[in-house]
Amino acid sequence: MSGDIRLPAADAAPTPLHDRARRFTAPEVVAGAAALFFVLAAVVPQWVAPGNPLGINPLSAFQPPSFAHGFGTDESGRDIYTRVVHGTGSSLLIGAAATAIGLGLGIVLGTLAGMFGPVVDFTVNRVLEVLFAFPGLLLALLFILVFGPGVITATIAVGLSTAPGYARIIRAQLIAVRRSAYVEAATVQGLGRTQILLRHILPNTLAPLFVLATLGVGQAIVWAATLSYLGLGAEPPTAEWGAMLSAGRTYITSAWWMSFFPGLFIVLIAVTATVLGRSLDRRLRHA
Amino acid sequence: MLRVLARIGGAVFVLWAVATVTFFAVRLIPGDPAEAVLGGPGSMASAEALAAVRREYGLDQPLFVQYLDQLVRLATGDLGRSYALSIDVGPLVLSQLGGTLLIATLALGLAWLLALALATWSTRGGRVAWYLGSGLEIVAAALPHFWFATALIVVFSIWLGVFPPISTSGVAGLVLPVVTLAVPLAGFLGQIMRESLLLALESPFVLSARARGESEAGVRWIHAVRHAALPAISLSGWAFGSLISGAVVVETIFARPGLGRTLLNAVTSRDVPVVVGVVMIVAVVYILMTLLTDLASRLADPRLAVRS
Amino acid sequence: MRSTPQTLAAIAGLVAVGLLATGCTTTPTETAVGDPISGGTFTYASGDAQPSCLDPHVGGNFPQALVSAQYLESLVSRDDNGAIIPWLAESWTTTDDGLVWDFTLQDDVTFTDGTPLNASAVQANVAHVLDPNTASSTGYLALGKVASTEAVSDTVVRFELTEPDSALLESLSQPWLAIQSPTGLERSKDENCEAPVGTGPFIVDSWVKQNAITLVRNDDYNSPPADAAHEGPAYLETIVWRFIPESATRYAALQSGEVDLIDNAQPDTIVQAEASDTLVHLDSPRPGASNRIELNGGKAPFDDVLVREAFIRSANVDDAVTSLFQGTATRSYAALGSREPLAVGRDDLFDYDPDAANALLDEAGWSERDSEGYRVKNGERLNVQFPVSTNQSIPAEQSIFEQIQATAKQTGFEVSLAPLDISSWYGALGANEYDAVSAPYTKAGPDVLRVLYHSDGIVPAPSGYFANLAQVSDPEIDALLTEAAQISDETERAALYADAQNRLLEGFHLLPLYDQQNHFLLQADVQGMRTLPSVSVPTLYDTWLNR
C-alpha cells in the first residue's frame, strides 16, 4: 500500500569522516565511556551510587541540587542521583527488551512478507496495515488494561506497538536486497532458497537494522514513560526513569530537577546508543 | 481497475479487522460497560437500573450477538450510541475529528519544515554542524510529549506569558500543542532525511547537475531535497499515526477537544462504541493518508510509478 | 465499650472539630470592597471529568454536583455549622414517630421554563429519581426510606417513610436530589441530560461536549438559600464551565487570566498562589467521610486486629502530609471530615510507633522475617495489596501511599501498590482483590458512616461494588448506626454516632489521612465566591467581578 520505506544509509556520515573509519572519533570515545557507565549502573548500581534508592526522608523533600544531593531530592526526600542510577537497569531493560520484541516480531513478519511469495506477502501486509491503522498508544493501552499494569506488560506493550514499523521497513529492505545483483547471481548458481535467505539476504538486511534498533531503545523508554504518565507504567516505588519523569512533571514549576535528570539520562542513553550503533555498523561494513 | 478493486477490498478488510479487534479488546478489559451509562464505574446502581440499561443497549445479549449487531450497524454507517455521553457516536467523532486533524496536520507540516531545515543546514556546515544537527535530532526524538508540553507551558505561559496554555484564544492557542507534537517528530524525520540527503548529494545525477554548472543551491533544492524527501514522504502515513498517539497526550494537557482525548476518556469508561468509532475514523484517515503519500511519492520519484 | 469517659472524650473531640469547621470556611467575601458590579463572563476551569449528563439525578457524581449547583436548587441547604436551613422549602414539620414529613414550599417560585414550583413538582422529582429508567444511584440511595409522597396542598408536600430517617434533611440538601421542572423531566432522558431545567440563578444555554458548558443568568431568579449574601438575580451574566484535566495547564490558564477559577488545585500551586497578589486560595474541605485508607478486615492478614493496628502504627502519615501537602492539608484522626459537627477525632490512636508495631506483629504470630526483611507466617509473606485509582488519588496522595509503603516495610509489611485506571480499580475492589484501599465518598452528614461501615454495605450492589470496603462486620456498630439513623433527638444522635466512631477507630478498621481536599484558586478580583456547605460545591450566585 504505502511506498517502500528506505533505511537510512548506514555509512552516511559526511565524507571527511570516511577516512577515519578505523580510528576512534571523539564522540565514539565519549559514547563508549558513557556506555560503560550505564552498564555499571545497570549491573552493579551500588558501586556507582551507594545510597538506598527507596530510602525516604519526608522532611528533606524537594531539595534542589546541592553538595549532599547532586541531583536534588524528590517529593519523598529520596536522593534523585541514587534513584536515577538504580533505575538504569529497569529502564534499559524496558528499552532493550521492548526493542527486541518489536524487532523480533518485525523480522518474522517482514521476512514472511518479503520472502514467501505474493500470497503470504499480501496477507502479512494486510495484518501490518491493521496494526498501522491502530494508534500505537491505543494498542499499548488496551494491552496493559487487559493484562494489568507493570514493567513487564509495559515492555511487551511498547514492543508490540513498535513491531509493525520494523516489519514494514524490513520487508522493503528484503525486497531490495532480493532484487540485487548478488542474490540473482546466487540464484543462478543454483543455491537453495533457505541458503540464499540465511547466507545472503538476512545478513545484508539485518546489518542496517543496528541504526534503527539504537534509535528504538530511546524511543521505547519514552513510550514507557508516556504509559507512566497515563498512570499505567512501572509500579511504585520502582526507580524507573519514565515513572520518575512522570512524577516530576507534577512539580515542574517548583522542583525542575525532579524531571530534568531522569529526562537527561533518557536522552543520554538515546545519544549513546545511536552513536555506538552507527559506529558499530560502519565498522562491520568496512570489515 | 483490478488494482483499484483490490485497494478498496484491502481498505474494507482493515476497517473490519480494526473494529473486531477493538470490540473484543475493550470487552476483555475488566469493567462493566453498563456502569458507564449510569454515571461511571463504581456507581451503586440498582439492579433495575442496570437491567434497564443492559436491555436498552443490548448488553444482555451474548457477546457474539452484540459483536454481530455492532458489525451490521457499522456496515450501514451507524457507529452506535455512546454509553457515557448518551449521544450518537458518528456526530461526536466527526465533531472531534476537526480539532485533531488541525493540530496533526499543522504539526506534520512544521515537523517537515524543521527536519528539512536541520538536515540541509547540517549537511552543509561541516563537522560541527553535523554533530550539532545530529545531536539536536536525537534529543528532539527522545522528548516525551507529556514532559515537553508541561515544560513549554511553564516557560511560555507561566514565565514569559507569550502563548496561552488553552485553546480559547484562536491561533495563539495552537502554537504550544503544535510545537509539542512537531518537535519530537521532526527529530525522527530529520535523522532519516539527512541520511538520504547525503546519499542523494553523492549520487550520479547530482554530480551531473554540478558538472552542468548548476548552482549549489539549485542542486540542493531541486535535485537532492526532492530525493531526500522521498523516505520522509512514505513515512508520513506512519508519522500521522504516531501523531494520533501524541494527540491523546497533547489534547489532555492542553484541554483541547479532539479524538485523542475522546479516546482516552472512552477507554477509561469502557465506552465501547466510542472507542470503536474513534479507531474506525483514525483507520479511515490512515488509509487516506497512505493513498496520498503513495501519490506524493510517485510525483517525487517517477521511477516508482513505472516500477509498479 | 459504651463507657462514659469515652463518650465524654468524644464530645470534647466533637467540640474541637466543630470549632475547626467554622474556622475553615472563611471566604474572600470578607475582603470585598465596594458595591457588587453586575455583569461579565466568568470562566470556571474544572479538573474533574466532564459529566456524562447534566441532570444529577442520573447516576450522581461530584462533577455533576459542581456544575448543577449553578442551575438547580434543593429543598433545603446547610449552613456553615452543619445546621439545616430553608431553601426551596421555607419550613418543614415531622410527626413524633418520624415517619411523616411535611415540607412547605416557597409559593412564588417558577422554573426557568415557566412551570410553577409546587407540591406535585416535588412529587415528580421523587418519582423521577426512583424510576429505574433514570438510572439514579446517589439520589436513589438517599431516598431509600421514602415509601410515598403526597400533595397535601399546592405548596405542602408530604414524604411518608418506611422507617424514621434522621438523615433525610441532610440527604435532601445534596445537589443529587435537586428539584427540576416536571415539564423538563417529561422530555426524553437525552434532552434532559443536555439542559436540565431548574429554579437556579443560571440557566443551561449550551453544552459543547468535551469542551465547555455555557450558562446564562436567570433574570427572574427569586429563590436564594437562607444563607445567601443578596437577593434577586445573580451578578454574573454568563458562566463558561471548562474542563482542563491537567493540573499544570489549569494553573497556567489561571495565571494567564484565561480562567477565573480552578478547582482541584495542587499543593505546590496553592503555596505559589498564596504568595502572589493576583490569586486567592479558597479551602473548602468536603463534608461526609474523611480521606482514609480502609483496611480490609474481611480476609487475611487484616482480619486480625493486631495486624491492622501494627500496620497503622508503622505508617508515618504525619511526616508524609507535612512534606507533600506543604501546609495545605491538616492531618485527620477521624472517620468523618472536619466539616461534620459530629466527627470524633482520636489522635491517641494513630501515632507512628514502629516498636509497638513490631511487638504487635510478633504477638500476632508474624514473628519471622525472610531474606528481604518482610515478615512471614506459615511460609506466607505479610503482603498488603493496595490498588490505587490514578483518576481519584492526586499525585501527592499517591506519594503518601509510597511513603507509607516505605515506612511499613521497616516493620516487615510488603505493600504492593498497583496503579489502576478507574474501571480496573473498581473491578479489583469488586473482586475482593485488595487489603488496603483509599476510596473517596461524599455524602452530607454522619449517615455516611452507615453507608461505609454497616455490615449491609458488604453485600455488593448489582454492579458488583460495595461501599463497606473495610468490610467491618460488627453487630454493635451496626446497631449503633441503625439507631442513630432513626433517632430524632439531636443529643442522643450525637452520642450514638460518637460511640460508633470510637468503636470503629479503636478497632483499627481505617487509617484517617486528612479531609477530602477541595481547594479552589481564583483571581483576586473575584468577589463573593463561596461554597454551599451541603457538599462543598461552589455557588456563583453571589459572585461578581471587581474589574
Image (spheres, coloured by chain):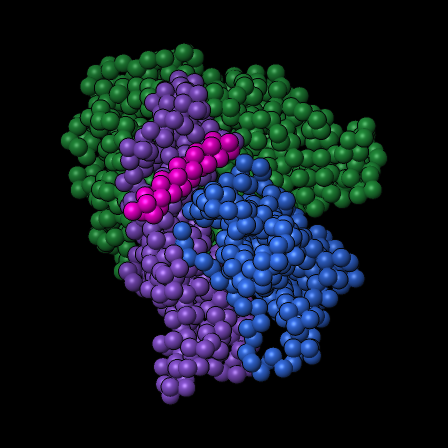
Chain colours: A blue, B purple, C green
- Position of residue A128 relative to residue C185, above or below, is below
Q: Is residue B20 magenta?
A: yes
Q: Quadrant of residue C409?
A: top right
Q: Residue furthest front?
A: A189
Which one is nearer the viewer's eye here, B209 or C230?
B209
**Percent of width and height locating residue C413:** 73, 38
Q: Is residue B186 left or right of residue C456?
A: left
**Percent of width and height locating residue A53:** 71, 55
**Percent of width and height locating residue C300:** 70, 26
Q: Is residue C18 left or right of residue B275?
A: right
Residue pictured at 53% horizontal, 62% vertical: A180
Q: Is residue A268 visible?
A: no
Which one is nearer the viewer's eye here, C197 or C40?
C197
**Percent of width and height locating residue A256:** 55, 64
Residue pictured at 51% horizontal, 33% vertical: B29
Q: Is residue C33 left or right of residue B270?
A: left
Which one is nearer the viewer's eye here, B184 or C154?
B184
Q: Quadrant of the N terminus of chain C?
A: top right
Q: Quadrant of the C terminus of chain C?
A: bottom left
Q: What range is drawn magenta here?
A: B1-29
Residue pictured at 19% horizontal, 26% vertical: C183
Which one is nearer the viewer's eye here, A136 or A60?
A136
Q: Could you tell me how many numbered marks the image carries?
A: 0
Q: Residue furthest bottom?
A: B213
Q: Is residue A25 visible?
A: yes
Q: Is the magenta region chiefly helix, strand or loop?
A: helix
Residue pictured at 74% horizontal, 29% vertical: C306
Q: Is residue C190 left or right of residue C25?
A: left
Q: Quadrant of residue A87?
A: bottom right
Q: Is residue C505 magenta?
A: no
